[in-house]
Amino acid sequence: MSRMVPLLLSIALSTTAWAASPPPVSATAKAMATAYVDDFKDMVRSTPDANPDEVACIERIPATAVADAMQEVIAQSLSADEQAEMERFYASPEGLRLLAIYRRWGDKRNPASDAELEEVLPIIRSPVQTKLFDATSFQSLGSIQAMNAIAPLLERCSASR
């Protein structure tokens, strides 16, 4: 019996740790995190009086910094069916293509063509996609959660001056 106690304790502790592990980040959360962080970087780059050292530091912030926050926002904002629909889409080549075209929307160096934009506008304007963008954009409550996730990294960038 005395040998069983350490074994049972070990199993109990590992089960608790396993249960506490968050699920893997979804393709949808990764896509929205990438868009959010890229948009944030674009905003910082376009600030006329931005400190070059801070800009360089911010350029190194990975999308993974806000992926968990985006995952939470998506879970709070979309139904299970809507999440499944977006997950199928963003895990597909079509979803990755949409994200790539969307990322080039305002790019002055490599803008999306009119034909590409016409191709993706119906998808972007779909009710579920609109709901997803509304939840994860800079003008949303999701932005607050994402910014909270980035804040410690931004503090390091400010301290690096």
Image (cartoon, rainbow, N blue to C red):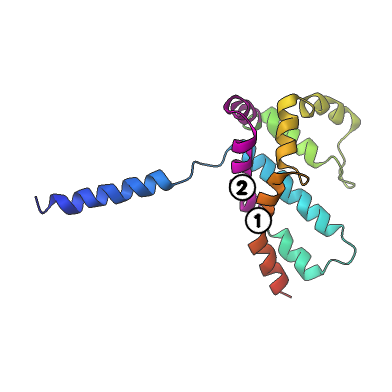
Q: Which region of the structure is painted magenta?
A: 62-89
Image spot of residue 21 (x, y percent): 44, 46
Tell me if residue 43 is in the magenta stretch.
no
Residue drawn at 67 percent across, 61 percent down = 151
Q: Residue furthest left?
A: 1
Q: Secondary structure at mark 1?
A: helix
Tell me if residue 74 is in the magenta stretch.
yes
What's the amino acid at mark 2? Ala
Q: Magenta-highlighted stretch: main secondary structure? A: helix
Give left or right: position of 72 versus 126.
left
Disc marking residue 87: none
Q: Residue furthest bottom?
A: 161
Lower sequence index among marks 1 and 2:
2
**Residue 57: quadrant of the picture:** bottom right
Q: Is residue 133 above or below residue 155?
A: above
- Nearest the eye: 55 or 159: 159
How crowded is the residue under tag 2: few (<14 C-alpha within 10 Å), some, or many (20+)? Answer: many
What's the amino acid at mark 1? Asn
- Number of labels in the image equals 2
Residue drawn at 74 percent across, 75 percent down = 161
**Residue 148: quadrant of the picture:** bottom right
Q: Is residue 141 above or below residue 54?
A: above
**Residue 114: quadrant of the picture:** top right
Asked whether the residues under the numbered discs 1 and 2 touch, taking CB atoms below 8 Å apart as contact, a structural biologist would say yes
Give left or right: position of 10 versus 113.
left
Image spot of residue 145 (x, y percent): 65, 50
- Nearest the eye: 21 or 72: 72
The residue tagged 1 is 148
How crowded is the residue under tag 1: few (<14 C-alpha within 10 Å), some, or many (20+)? Answer: some
Disc marking residue 69: 2
Residue drawn at 71 percent across, 48 percent down = 143
**Rounded to the nearest whole Å, what is the CA distance between mark 1 and mark 2?**
9 Å
